[in-house]
Amino acid sequence: MLERPKRKNPVLRTRQPTLPPAARSRIALGLTAAAALGRFELQQCRDCGTVQYPPREACQQCLSIRLDWKPQPQTGELLSDTVLHHSNDLFFRERLPWRLGLVKLDCGPTVVAHLHERVAQAPGKVTVAAKLDRAGQAVMVALPGKEENMAEDRQLREFTCDPKFRKVLVTDGKTAAGQALVKALAAAGADLIWVGHAEPWKKFAGFDELEKIKQVTLLPLDVTDSKNVREVAAEIGGKVDILVNNAEYHRAYGISNRSGVDTARAEMDVNYFGLLRLAQEFGPAMRGRGADGLASATAWVNVLSIYALANFPPHGTFSASKAAAHSLSQCLRAEMRPAGVRVINVFPGPLDDEWNQLLPPPKVAPAALANAVVKALREGVEDVYPGDVAQEWLARWRDNPKALEKELST
Amino acid sequence: MTRRSYEGVAVAVPVTVPYVRYSIRSAHWWLARCLSDLLKQSRLNKADIDGLAVSSFTLAPDTAIGLTQHLGLSPRWLDHVPFGGASGVVMLRRAARAVQAGDADVVACIAGDTNHVDSFRLTLANFSQFARDAVYPYGAGGPNASFAFLTAYYMRTHGATREDFGKLCVAQRANALKFEHALFKKPLTLDEYMGARPIADPLHLFDCVMPCAGADGFLVLSEQRAKALGLQYARLLGTIERHNAFASDPVQMRAGWVLDRADLYEQAGAAPEDMDFVQTYDDYPVISLMQIEDLGFCAKGEGPEFIRNHTFTCEGSFPLNTSGGQLSVGQAGAAGGSLGMVEALRQLTSAAGARQVKDAKLGLVSGFGMINFDRGLGSGAAIVSC
C-alpha cells in the first residue's frame, strides 16, 4: 500500500530528474508507438505469422521484410527473476533495488521485463504490458493478473502518472467537462486540486458543488491574460504535479460563414496561446520537480480535439486552433522529456455540449472524458482518443489521412 | 566431405600484457604491446608477421585494417574477430587454416581492450542493437542481469546451490594466486564468497568478473617454422564453432557445444576423460558449469554433483581455469576470449610455473561470447596437445 508522502523539507536539495536509457533503434519505436496508445503490439510476419521480439528488420523465420505491428496476447510464463542491487545507470542506481523478470510469452518470444512487486518468484503466470517509461520509451512490464491497487507498485509508479497523493491544476472549472475532471481526479485520490475560473466575479453553474469537494481550491485563472497566468504560476507553479489544460474556446463554422477574424482569434487566444502561456510559466517549475520524490511533477494533460488530426470544415477555425495546439504540445513534450514529465494529449470526439448541438450522437459525455484522463494518467499512456467518433477518426486517419480529408470535405 | 585435420599447425608464444584495473591508454596501446611481446619472445621481425587476427571492443572506430597502419604492419592475411569470449577459438581455427593453405606463414592472434573509468558503462549501453532496444533500458545491469536469470533458472531446475558455484570461484582464486598477472592477490574463502554483497540475485560480488584493461596473444604457424625458430609449441587436434544454436530454447541452458562436441572429440581422437585440464570461458560460474555439461564431462543437470565430486585447482581432480580465469585474473574485454588459450599453451609447453598441471599433455579450451540479447550466441572449443 502506497503511503502518503511526507511533507517536503524545503531546505534539502530537490533531487534532479534523470531518465532511464532512452536510445532505441528506429524499428524498436514500433513498440513505443503502440504503448503510447496503451496497446501491446509485437512484430508479426505477414508471410509466415511468426511473432518476434526484440524488433528486427526481417522475419527471423522466413526472412520476409513484410512485418506488421499487431496486438498480441499478453499472457506468459515467468521463467526467472532477479533483483538488481547494482546498476551503472544513474536513474536505476537512485531507485535500487530493482526487480526484473525473464518471461516466455505465450505468443512465442522471450522478453526481459520490469517485474511488479506482487508477482511471486518464478515460475508462474504473468501478464505483460508495454508501458512508457520516464524517458517516454516503451518498456515491457510483467504484472500479476487482475488486482486492485496495481498502480501502487513502487516501480510501476515510476512509469505512470497516478494522481493519487498528487497536486493537480485544472485550468477551467466552469464547463461541465472541467467539473467532471475535478470530480474524477478527487475520486482518484488527488491531494489538492486547484480549479481555475476565468471570470471570478461571476458565479457559474456548478460552483457550489465544486466548492464542496474538500480537495478543491478555486482560483481566478484566465489563460488569455499573460499577467494573470504568470501570477498564478508564481504562486502555485512549484507545487503542481499534474496540470490539466482544458480551457477551450469553441465556435462553429469555417471560413465563409463568418466575416472577420475575431472569433478565430479568440479560439487561438485560448486554445493555442493559452497553452503557450501556461507552458512558459508552469513548464520550467514542473521540469525542476520531475524527480521530486513519490509526489513529483509527473504529467501535463492537454484536452485537444479529434479535429486536431484533420480539419472538420463545419468547425473549421476551431479545428485549426486545435491543430496548432497539437503541434505546440509536441514541442512541449520534447521540452518536458528531460525531466520525465509526460505530456498526455487527449483527442476527444465531439463533446456533448451546446457547441456540438447539431452533431449527431455518439457524443462524449463529460464524465467519460474525465474518466479517460484519469485512466491515461494511471496507465501512463501518451495519446488518448475518448469516444467512438474519435476512435473511428483515428482508425481512418491511420489507415489513410488523405482519404479522411476527402471524406470530411464532402 | 570429411573435415581436414589440423596436422602441421603449431600454436606458440603465449603472451599476456599485464592487466590493470583502469588504463588511460587506448586499445591500440594494449594491442601494440601484445604484438611487441610476441615479436620479442619469438625473435621474429615485424615483417615476418604476414597474418594478423584481432579481437577488441574498444578499438572502435578502428578495425583490424586500421590497426595495420597504426602499427606499421603489412600482412597478406587479415581478420577482425569481434566475437568477445568466442574470439580466441575462432581466431585460432581461422589462422590454422590460413597457415595450412599457405595464405599466411605466421599469424599473430591478438585480443585486447582498454578500460577507462566510464568505458564499461558505455560498452554496455551500445553493445548491440538488441541490447540497446530490449535489455539496457531494464535497469542497465548489463550482463549481470542476464546471467542472474540463467543462474536462478539453473539453480531451480538442477538443484545447484550458491556453495556449488562458490567452490569453483574459490578454487580459481587459489590458482590465480600462482599467476603473477592476476589482479586478485588475496585468497578467497567460501565464507567470503557467501557473504559478499548481492549484485543481481542470486549473483553476488564474486560471481561477477571485474572489467579491466589488458591483452593476450599467441602465434599460429607451421610446426616446421616453429621448430626452425626454436619455439615451444602446442599442436591443434580439433576445433568447433557454432553461433545462435538452440534459438528457440526459451532460456539458455545449453549452447552450440552440444551440437558439435562429437565432431570435436572425433577430430582429436580423444574423449572428455582424456583431458588433463580444461579452460572454460568463465564470465560467471554458471557458464563454466554449462560448458562442463555441454562438452560432455557430465550430463545436463549433473553439474552440481560433478562439482561436489571434484576439485578444481591445478593439482585437483579436474584442473579448471588454471590461471584463475577471468573471475580471478580480471576481464580485459575481448582478451577474456584468449585468456584460457594462452594458459593452455603455457601448460602444454611446461611454462606454467607453480601452476603446472602434472603431466599435462592434452587440454581443452572453450570459448563463449556475445550476450546480444538474452543469451550468449557464440560457442567454440579447441583441443590442444603438446
Image (cartoon, coloured by chain):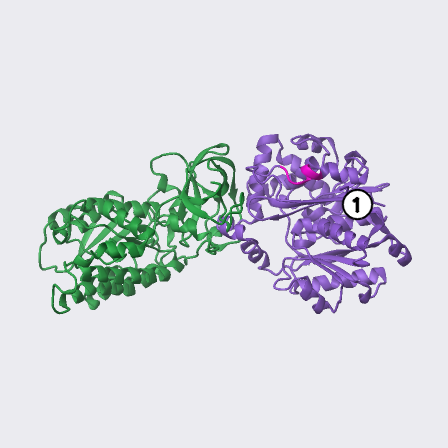
User: Which quadrant holds residue A334?
Assistant: bottom left
Compare residues A121 and A390 and report the one nearer the observer.
A390
Q: Is residue B243 left or right of residue A333?
A: right
At horizontal 56% and vertical 58% (from top left) the residue drawn is: B122
Residue A11 visible in the snapshot: no
Decide which of A184, B161 is in the foreground and name it: A184
Residue B107: x %, y % from top left:
78, 58
Q: Quadrant of residue B153?
A: top right
Q: Is residue B258 magenta?
A: yes
Start-end of magenta stretch? B254-260
Q: Quadrant of residue A375?
A: top left
Q: Is residue A212 left or right of residue A50?
A: left
Which amino acid lies under the numbered mark 1 shown in the image of this protein?
A: Arg
Question: Where residue B189 sits: x, y (%)?
Answer: 68, 41
Q: What chain is the purple one? A: B
Residue B68, compared with residue A140, is above or below; it is: below
What shade does chain A have? green
Give the letter of the chain under mark 1: B
